[in-house]
Amino acid sequence: QGGGVKVNELRVANSLKPLDVVSVPLLPSDGKVDEQEEDKLSSSNLRMRELGTLRKPVQPKPHLSPYPYIIGLTGGIASGKSTIAKYLETLGAGLINCDQLGHRAYDVGTRGNQVVRELFGEDIALPDGSIDRKKLGAIVFSNKDEMNKLNQAIWPLILAQVKEEIARLSESHKVIVIEAAVLLSAKWQDQVHEIWVTFIPEQEVSH
Ligand SMILES: CC(C)(COP(=O)(O)OP(=O)(O)OC[C@H]1O[C@@H](n2cnc3c(N)ncnc32)[C@H](O)[C@@H]1O)[C@@H](O)C(=O)NCCC(=O)NCCS
Ligand SMILES: Nc1ncnc2c1ncn2[C@@H]1O[C@H](COP(=O)(O)OP(=O)(O)OP(=O)(O)O)[C@@H](O)[C@H]1O
């Protein structure tokens, strides 16, 4: 009943005619496959059953050595990447966080720092020489061309750091997770054995 009311609210908001809401007794599930599943037939159960299944078979990556096995973890902003990455770390994976590498790419005294100043002007630096990320973010998140300019300069620096981190972590880890929102747009898919994408429904985010 509640779901039907919600659907109608959305339909009306989108200038569609509300539908009649008819309640029927709960349809029993065809048997729970997991303790956490509900007893009724539900979309949550169906989604849960998809957990851990592959969307596409993993393609062979002959140019990568089999170990460390590298998972590229990507997805939209606030879609749960870090939460999943930290969980994988508790299972023993080595983590590479590309947001952090991106920040370090223009640390004071680096070539990246100089490049960002050349591209965006001296005003982009704080008195201590560090890049004002709030200011830079305001520029690039509101202008695609500026974002492209930053990306072209910073992505190669991040990738070089990723490769160094892989070499370092491979001494102690068999599985490495690279968390990168830009994994696909930066075309880093060849760096990883498989890609995991996190997604979250829009309405869940607004909660
Ligand atoms: C734009 C910058 C200055 C904003 O810094 P700030 O500390 O305010 O935010 P933070 O880095 O935490 O990013 C906020 C969110 O935006 C995402 N994001 C960052 N850069 C990008 C980008 N180029 N394209 C798409 N999403 C991005 C992040 O993954 C995160 O989810 C900074 O993110 C940056 O220098 N980005 C360019 C380098 C890059 O691509 N980094 C992301 C590697 S995954
Ligand atoms: N399965 C989940 N259900 C509900 N909330 C979640 C879930 N996973 C993570 N969250 C919450 O959503 C928020 C964003 O999660 P997280 O920081 O892991 O996302 P992210 O993709 O790494 O974000 P960013 O784009 O900032 O890097 C956090 O407050 C987290 O606690």
Image (spheres, rainbow, N blue to C red):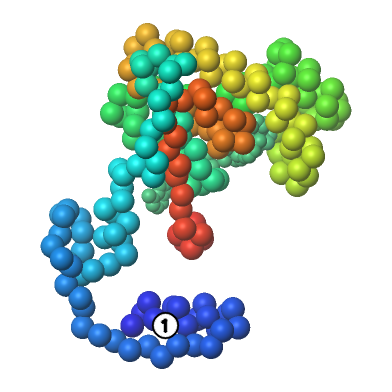
Placement of the N terminus among the 4 image quadrants: bottom left
Seen in the picture, residue 90 relative to 173 is either above or below; the reply is below
Query: Residue 129 in the image: x percent, y percent?
Result: 76, 20
Residue beneath the point at 77% across and 24% down: 116
Q: Name the residue type under label 1.
A: Val
Residue 66: name its quadrant: top left
How packed mark 1 is, by other alpha carbons closer than 10 Å (few <14, some 14-19, many 20 or more), is: some
Query: Residue 90 in the image: x percent, y percent?
Result: 30, 29
Does the image show residue 18? Answer: yes
Per the image, the residue denoted by label 1 is: 5
Ligand 1 visible in quadrant: top right
Relative to 94, 97 lies left or right? right
Relative to 129, 164 lies left or right? left
Does the image show residue 82? Answer: no
Relative to 122, 194 lies left or right? left
Residue beneath the point at 76% across and 43% down: 144
The kind of secondary structure element at disc 1 is helix
Residue beneath the point at 86% across and 28% down: 121
